[in-house]
Amino acid sequence: MARAPVSEEILKEKFGPHLNYKPPGGWNDESVHPAEKLVKTHCCFCGQQCGIQLKVRENRVIGFEPWEEFPFNRGMLCPKGVKRYLQGNHPDRLLAPLMRSDQGFSPASWDEALSFAVSRMREVQDKYGKDAIAVYGGASLSTEKSYLLGKFARVALGTRHIDYNGRLCMVSAGTAYKLAFGVDRSPIPWSQIPKAEVLFVIGANIGDCAPITTDYIWRCRDNGGKLIVADPRMTPITRNADLYLPLRPGTDLVLLMGMLHVIFRDGLVDREFISQYTTGFEAVAESVKEWDLRKVAEMTGVPPESIEKAARWIGRSKRAIMMHARGLEHQSKGVENCLAVLNIALATGNVGREGAGPTMITGQGNGQGGREHGQKCDQLPGQRSLADPAAREYVAGVWGIKPEELPQPGYSAQEIMNAIHSGEIKGLLSICFNPLVSLPDANFTREALSKLEFFGVIDFFLSETAHHADVVLAGSLQEEEDGLACSAEGRVIHWQKSIDPPGDARRDSDIIIDLAHRLGRGQFFPFKNPADIFEELRVASRGGVADYYGITYERVDKQMGIFWPCPSLDHPGTPRLFVDNKFYTHDGRAHFNVTEWRPSGDPINEEYPLLLTTGRVVSQYLSGTQTRPNNIRSKTETGSR
Amino acid sequence: MFGYEFYVDPSRCIGCRSCLQACEECATHRGKSMINFDFIERKESISSAAYVCWHCDEPTCAQVCPADAIKKGEDGIVHSSLKPRCIACNNCVLACPFGIPKMMIPEQQMMKCDMCYDRTSIGKRPMCATVCPSQALSYVRPEEIAYRREKPTNIFYFGSQKITTKVYMMAPAEREAIALDVVDYMWEENHDLVATRE
């Protein structure tokens, strides 16, 4: 029974989160004991993946120095990035595996903890079948770890059920881009943003969630660009918006269809582009006819003249960029919302050309790379489909198994939790995911976790979810293992190993590989280092949409990042997609998709009389497991004037 | 210094406080942030402004110091008070028209932004302006600032006091100087809340 062994209060007292503001040794230690080396790597937090140099001494990260040569952020960092170096020496850091006991959690040896985990997983699978174990992953893992986890679930455990925390994040955007363009990646690198004439930002609190992007937007305005912001909340970038559309929460789709209505009504469409390179235009044009300005204004609360102005600015512009993020995507209509943005981009021809295009602002550190190589429930490496027989045959060949041994697509993240609650899934191995905080309805999740017959967690802090574990395997931080990641731009970058995991903590990949060996599947996991995993990943992704075959660690370091697809070692990478108006769909064309309005699944009624919306703050990241211990917010408030 | 100048543009500030966090990483005042940061509670407004010491050509703080503890270097940088001289009288704190000096009670010393002297004196950029995600704080060459919508000025009027500074403020292109008079912002009975002379 995976209930917390002792009270939350006792666990929090022992394992945190405790606040910690000071570098190891105190503020003045560095002047006595300076750094031995500077390691050029990246921030461990969001999808911007800013370059940073970590100061390292005696296997400890003691500070940072801006990395001004890295082209994306040129030294810029948000407050999370400035303080990210505090994580490794945090007093709450898990330094050894933990086994639950009646008194709470006690340190154990690796052999004890791993033997226990493996014997319990075997018991569950013997009793209930292979699919009775599920695996949760996350998009703060390196691309190598994400790939390894997908292979581990399917080859070592043989379960259908693996999914990741990106499911709660922006999978809806990825789905929309796959429907419209056949590829799940931002079509443009950020260097395009200052070139736009019009920036349309919807559902993206850039100032708080992607702070470095702010400078790109301000530079666009310096160049004469206009900024349109659509958001129920006035977020920081709104201060310089040329047009603000204060829509009611959840009415994004109506606003977007209203804008498309104006674009069609006023003839602001790019007919040549539409006829040559797209399909499905007529059906979309027909479908938005009903969304006239009055109706849209009444539903969204946005003045009709503002809607008209936004549509005309975009429609008349040769270079419009539409940026969206979780505000648009975290909705029951997330896919439709994104499709509506893409319809506007396609209708106005703002795709493929310089300074134009839609883009999603990927949120998690490796939100892009983590969703490309097989830790999703329906996916194989290279953004291949697990249901595609050719893809199954190719990847099975790379892995040295028969295609029929590959499990079929399994449940997505919330469906896994539902199946745990209903008793269908009995065991769970979770890494880089804090579902008790991040899934909706924490009481339901807590109930589900308490029904598990085996629950193993790999983490470096004891998260709320880990309170319910039978065994906690002390894993590694981003800087404790080599690996690649892919930023919001589609730029593949290199997380340089700066230090070894402290104490008895181990590299995440070593833990997973060790588990695979103990499960008797060692011959499929002969990896000694992340580089070995990447060599296999390159081949496994070859020929897929997200083709990494031409990427090597050395090339990434030399070029300061490579944009995929990069199919061969002499290929320069692909910063901008669709420049030749060729799309990754089966017919090579971009697809319009009809979107249908439906009301919210949680309407206002007597029991729930308030309409609330969520928002984020710059000082926290994801479920806060990593940022609450260095709570920047309370610190800065006492530090301000 | 080294061809760089410091530019402050509050209209770019997103209130992220990266500057506050980075400032305390600077070696001349480890653990103490010298950024001046103004904000209004987010639920009321998204307004915020971060700024550093303006490093006046004729620093008021130094002029009013009875202990002669505040010194300006030949490079134009106005430093924290000299610890052996400072009597923690607060004169500088009260007199500075920009509200920059900070009285550190435990240390009994006035401390302030020294533009990351350990960094800028050897050609590196100061912490705050290097990390600032919106470049509301910028430390760049003049030609790099020229393309912006707003234009730099370093002339301020506070009432009848004219101040010229090392650090530039970005202002609307037509403004040559920034003029403020406290009287403009004082409340009078027949006005709503704040009144301006316009």
Image: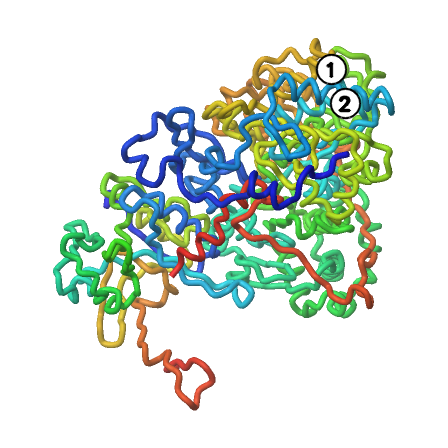
Task: Give the vertical position of A408 relative to A609 (above or below).
Answer: above
State yes or no: discs 1 and 2 in contact (Cβ < 8 Å).
yes
The disc labelled 1 sits on which kind of residue? Answer: Leu
Q: Disc 2 sits on a residue from what chain?
A: A
Q: Which residue is mark 2?
A: A121
Q: Earlier in the sequence, mark 1 or mark 2?
A: 2
Q: Are marks 1 and 2 on the same chain?
A: yes
Judge from the rendering whether residue B135 lies leftward or rightward of residue A623; answer left or right: left
Residue A552, position as x, y percentages in the image: 55, 19
Q: According to the image, label 1 marks what residue?
A: A519
| Horizontal and vertical percent position of residue A305 | 67, 69
Q: Residue B197 falls in which quadrant of the image?
A: bottom left
**Amino acid, disc 2:** Met
Graded by Cα atoms within 10 Å as few (under 14), some (14 to 19) or many (20 or more), the crowding at tag 2 reads many
| Relative height, residue A348 to residue A547 (above, below) | below
| Relative height, residue A162 to residue B39 (above, below) | above
Chain for disc number 1:
A
Q: CA distance from mark 1 to mark 2?
A: 9 Å
Question: Can you say which quadrant of the picture contains the C terminus of chain A?
Answer: bottom left
